[in-house]
Amino acid sequence: MDATEVDERESTWENHHPRFRVYVQEPSGETYTTATYDLTGADVLQAMDWAQRQAATRSDAVWALALVGQDSRGLRGLTWLVGMDANDPPSDDHEIDLRLRMTSRTARPVGVPSRDQWRPERSSAAVVHANPWFTVTETVDASERSWFRLRSSDSVIVAAMVDDRIVFVHGVRDTTGPEPRYELPSGGIEPSDDSAAAAAARELLEETGAVCGELTEVGTFVAEPGVSDVRTRVFVGTVTERRETALEPGEDWTTVELEPSEVDAAVSAGEVTDGATLAALLLLRMP
């Protein structure tokens, strides 16, 4: 993308009542079936919100948004604002990128605040931020107060035992300061995971290289009920095998095994500050 500063007087007319064209397209073999709509009485944010809401009601649908205009001959045409016609083969790298981003929006909607929704309903939540890990929604009540909620998949946390020792990861997170801290292996349940137990086994292996013959769920908790309903499921198992870790970039962690007394000492010393780890340790000690 290029940005060039220009003189604001380099235009001769303005239009405050644009006409938008929306394509909602569903895959059908090697092509797409297209439902086409013209929108008036909206701005571009409302048009985007309306378009993605329409696409969400169809299977694997993509959407694109254009500005309807006329050329010097009086012929109607489209200036694409978001995406493009999915049935047009891309002709350059820019159009290839447009197509890829169109597809990604089926899983990660464009975040549009409630006040910019198309005919917003007070009881409906609008996505105001989305990324591969979580979304943030906004709901506006009758008194115009905004309520924000964080939405993501449920997560897992694992206490893997070696005799009476518990396997921890030890390292630094950029969110909690420069001092290394202890955490139990944990992570989100991904769509590719067959079950929560499978997610727990995957996270344990990736972060520590440990493999348990069987993982048993011992409890669940909601870490941040004020902003999210995401549940963390706690698993325990006995290590039967060691393999290579598969740490992600930024996970500069080492694997350690702590005796119960060492865990208590680390908690007392403020070396365990992860709320999920503290909650899991409490559940592990419940009769």
Image (cartoon, helix red, strand yellow):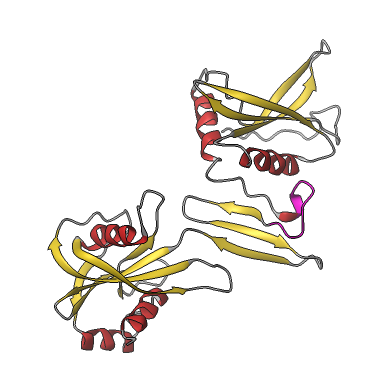
Which of the 4 image quarters holds residue 278?
bottom left
Which of the 4 image quarters holds residue 285?
bottom left
Give yes or no for residue 244 being in the magenta stretch.
no
Quadrant location of the N terminus?
top right
Q: Residue at x 34, y 68 (%)?
A: 157
Can residue 135 be seen at all in this image of the molecule? Answer: yes
Q: Position of residue 55 (x, y in %)?
A: 63, 38
Can residue 173 be seen at all in this image of the molecule? Answer: no
Which residue appears farthest toward the top when viewing the image? 73
Of residues 179 and 87, the one nearer the viewer is 87
Magenta residues, as a range? Answer: 115-124
Name the magenta segment's main secondary structure.
Answer: loop
Tell whether 153 sits left or right of 54. left
Q: Is residue 47 above or below residue 142?
A: above
Q: Residue at x 19, y 60 (%)?
A: 209
Give yes or no for residue 120 being in the magenta stretch.
yes
Total labels: the figure holds: 0
Q: Residue at x 67, y 49 (%)?
A: 112
Q: Position of residue 242 (x, y in %)?
A: 13, 61
Tell whether 180 sits left or right of 52. left
Q: Is residue 86 above or below residue 171?
A: above
Of residues 262 and 25, the one nearer the viewer is 25
